[in-house]
Image (tube, rainbow, N blue to C red):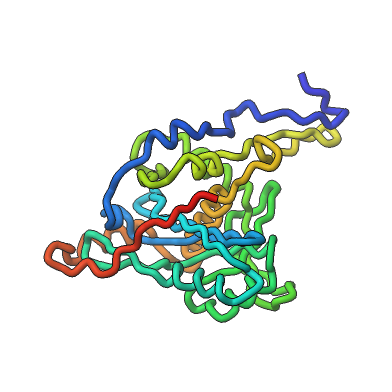
Amino acid sequence: WVNTKLGESWEDQAGDTVPADPLMARRENWGEALPASVAVLTAGVDVQGDRIEVQILGWGRDEEAWVIDYRVLWGDPSGPRLWSDLDMVLQATFPHPAGLDLPVRAAAIDTGGHHTKMAYEFCRTRLARRIWAIKGRGGPCIPVWPRRPTRTNKGKIPLFIVGVDAVKDAVYARLRLTEPGPGAIHFPRRLDADYFRQLTAERVVTRFERGRPIRSWQPKRDGERNEALDTFVYAHAALHGLISMGLRLNEEVEGMAFAPSRTGVEAGRVIRSAWLRS
């Protein structure tokens, strides 16, 4: 029983939480090349006081997803060197079994936290590469990706408001899928326990205000880090940014089938994960 008049909070009983250990047990080893089903890469970027964290996701038919890379770039975000390191990560290409080297097609960089001005400047000069400044906003009825950006920010650049609650609802629903197929998420063997703790660091809490239920995503424990979840959310949002521009993901997947096989083709530079403990 919940006292709706007193504004009591309670954890959603619908199962909007996922344990970390079963996800870690599902890790796969697909080698150095991208999984053959991946057709599009997107990135999510989170800026902290002493580092920048980057997650790159691969997308296949019906938004089946693969975690391709996770980077923790240590340094001072108030200076240019760390942002240059980020630029190198976002310019990297990844070898595909079809014989192509896939680039990151779009990246979403959170500007709502640390070093907002530097994040704005980084995105301003890279709009042609679809390096987008975003700001997450919780609450109901906020779409994953807006129809158009706002420019009412200090940087006067396109700023995309991302409905983070809607994305987290989708991500946690997908984390519960245990079989490959539409919406499923695949993890590489190299990811460690810290990644999965961060990915599953939140839960839904429902609070009644004036008798009305208000859902929100909250940390399971105070002070728990969630950068793996945040960067996953941003990379997911970047995919929807591409879709809003006309990307047809399933057609991209079908197009990969007509690319020449990588057999006998020089693989080029292989990008290895640099997941670092913090």
Tell whether 16 sits left or right of 104: right
State the image quarter where residue 267 is shown: bottom left
State the image quarter where residue 252 is shown: bottom left
Q: Is residue 261 above or below residue 152?
A: above
Q: In terms of depth relative to the viewer, which is nearer, 263 or 140?
A: 263
Q: Residue furthest left?
A: 264
| Image point (66%, 40%), residue name | 219
Q: In terms of depth relative to the viewer, which is nearer, 257 or 48?
A: 48
Q: Residue furthest top?
A: 1
| Image point (30%, 64%), residue name | 270
* Residue 134 % position (x, y): 62, 64
Tell whether 250 sits left or right of 237: left
| Res. 240 visible in picture | no
| Res. 16 visible in picture | yes
Q: Is residue 275 above or below residue 74?
A: above
Q: In terms of depth relative to the viewer, which is nearer, 134 or 230?
A: 230
State the image quarter where residue 7 is shown: top right
* Residue 223 % position (x, y): 69, 42
Tell whether 264 sits left or right of 50: left
The image quadrant where one finds the N terminus is: top right
* Residue 97 % position (x, y): 22, 59
| Image point (33%, 56%), residue name | 38
* Residue 106 % position (x, y): 47, 67
| Total residue callouts | 0
Tell whether 208 sits left or right of 166: right
| Image point (16%, 63%), residue name | 261
